[in-house]
Image (cartoon, rainbow, N blue to C red):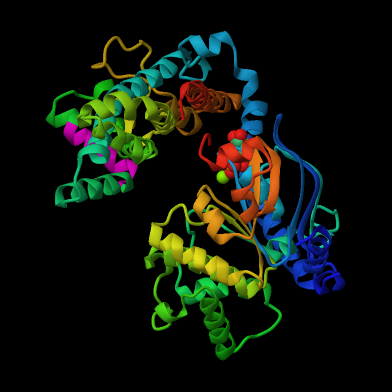
Amino acid sequence: MDMNTEESIDAAVGLAIHTDALNLWYGDFQALYDVNLDIKKGRVTSLIGPSGCGKSTFLRSINRINERLGYVRIEGAIDVFGNNIYAPEVELVQVRKQVGMVFQRPNPLPASIRENILFGHKLHNRERKYSRDDEDEIVEESLRQVLLWDKVKDNLRRKATGLSLEEQQKLCIARLLPVKPSVLLMDEPCSALDPKGTAAVEELIWELRGKYSILIVTHNMAQARRASEECIFMLMGKVIEHTNTADMFVTPQHQETADYIEGRYG
Amino acid sequence: MSDTELIANPFLETDLNVSAKRTEKLFKILFMLMAGLLILPVLIILTTLVVKGGGMLSFDFLFTNPTNGMTEGGIFPALLGTVWLVGVALIISVPVGVAAAIYLSEYAADNWFTRSINLAIINLAGVPSIVHALFGVGAFVIFFGFGTSILAASMTLAVMTLPVVIVATRESLQAVPPAFREACWNMGATRWQTIRRVILPNSVSGILTGVILEVSRTTGETAPIMFTGAAFFIPVLPQSVFDQTMAMSLHLFVVSTQVPHVPEGLPYGVALVLIAMVLLMNSASIALRMYLRGKKKW
Ligand SMILES: Nc1ncnc2c1ncn2[C@@H]1O[C@H](COP(=O)(O)OP(=O)(O)O)[C@@H](O)[C@H]1O
Ligand SMILES: [Mg+2]
């Protein structure tokens, strides 16, 4: 594939997230340095790098959760689908709606599976009354998308906290979907799961590709390799390399990337 | 350009956001108002006391005996008496309460014995102070034969504060993460070694401050000491725990209601000193907490 066709594909795909000289400080400590990234729409992009290199920090600035800490300062811009989410007229709630986040430990609410799925939906659709049938449909649709429907369809009233960790994590993803997010952020979504659960969640992430733009932080090289199309390598708050996953693992362009991938540090 | 970019900016405020934010603001203001309301009684009490009783304060007021049927002179015997009563009560209730809390938090299994102790603690905390007073008379003054004395009164206070000491201590102990205990056991430490080396050092700030805070409240108790050790008027200072004594709380009651021709400022002055004693203990406990927090390692 020559350069021209590749560029035209990129243009057609469009950008989900674009950052421009993003710098972030926790108090006096600078955690991100001039991050310039273009993350494509509908792709699964993985974010790798040693602990403390700023992966979570970057992720958390895309749904503006960082700023809850009073001492965080951000410079630069983050555009999500072409709109700067740090613009003064932006409504935080809308950002959180568009940009869903999945955490390391599954955090279902202490309620039934059904209520978990409908929680966000009800928050954001208070002006319309939904019938039971509509709600049932939403629940089924969301659970089907995360490949959980067949397993729990007869137990929708069961406590969500009683599910296995793998199922809980899938539920946490399903819970975001009725709100119709366009970007899903996942911060080490499999690190609390066993290998079987990890494989199942990876399969799900692969399944959601195309419908959502997914950015996933992982410590697991094999996972980055298997479950992502593009890969970003970060080191000490800087982006070192961003390419197709296949290329990164076969022909890394930087010595640091090669060292990290081969397990020489991190 | 993709279709998503063509539609309007999805991050702008919607009508739904506006109404949600209005409700949000309403509740915040409501809650803030209620929290602010709390300051009001404190302010009113303190200003009244300072305005009306501030003039009474002097070295002589604090450090001389009351004279002329308690309508003149100072409050020294009452001041010292309260220090005695609270001090002895602390000496009794803290070791007992802390030990009991350590047992309940670190050793006790969940069985009928533990549950009945917990039930006893809850019930003890609910007993009205006048009942404690009568219990104190029966148990300490008469049965143990301490007579009406500082010892009997302080023991009554100690029994009364025991539940809060236990609860405050237990909460501090339980705030130490279970992982610390497991780490110790895993290296072959016994329970006592774990408590001694890890749990107590990490909870002592909470225990001390909780305990001081709770006990300082007994400074103002009147009923439990009235029949057990505090006296109306004794012009001599107590020499040992077997003496009777005057006390600030009872003295305030007496000069406010029992003695004729008391100058108007006197009761306010007594109340001001009493409150100052409690605030002083509270500040000491907060200072202690800050000092010990600074040394904490997690
Ligand atoms: N809330 C915070 N306050 C101060 N420093 C933080 C905070 N969160 C993270 N950091 C620091 O920022 C750097 C990046 O952290 P993080 O984004 O969590 O790294 P990663 O997810 O790649 O392991 C680290 O050095 C970390 O110590
Ligand atoms: Mg992280």
**Towards the viewer: A139 or A193:** A193
Q: Residue at x 19, y 49 (%)?
A: B116
**Towards the viewer: A98 or B87:** A98
> Does B211 lie within the magenta span?
no
Compared across the picture, whether B277 is left or right of A5 comes to: left
| Percent coordinates x, y for residue A213 in the rendering | 68, 65
Q: Residue at x 46, y 73 (%)?
A: A113
Compared across the picture, whether B100 is left or right of B214 comes to: left
| Percent coordinates x, y for residue A35 in the rendering | 75, 43
**Towards the viewer: B84 or A113:** A113
Compared across the picture, whether A173 is left or right of B203 comes to: right
| Percent coordinates x, y for residue A46 in the rendering | 61, 54
Q: Is residue A83 above or below residue A251?
A: below
Q: Residue at x 49, y 59 (%)?
A: A107
**Does residue B261 appear anywhere in the picture?**
no
Q: Residue at x 62, y 75 (%)?
A: A178
In the displayed image of the protein, which residue is found farthest to the front?
A2
Q: Is residue B74 above or below residue A83?
A: above
- Magenta stretch? B127-139
Q: Quadrant of ligand 2?
A: top right
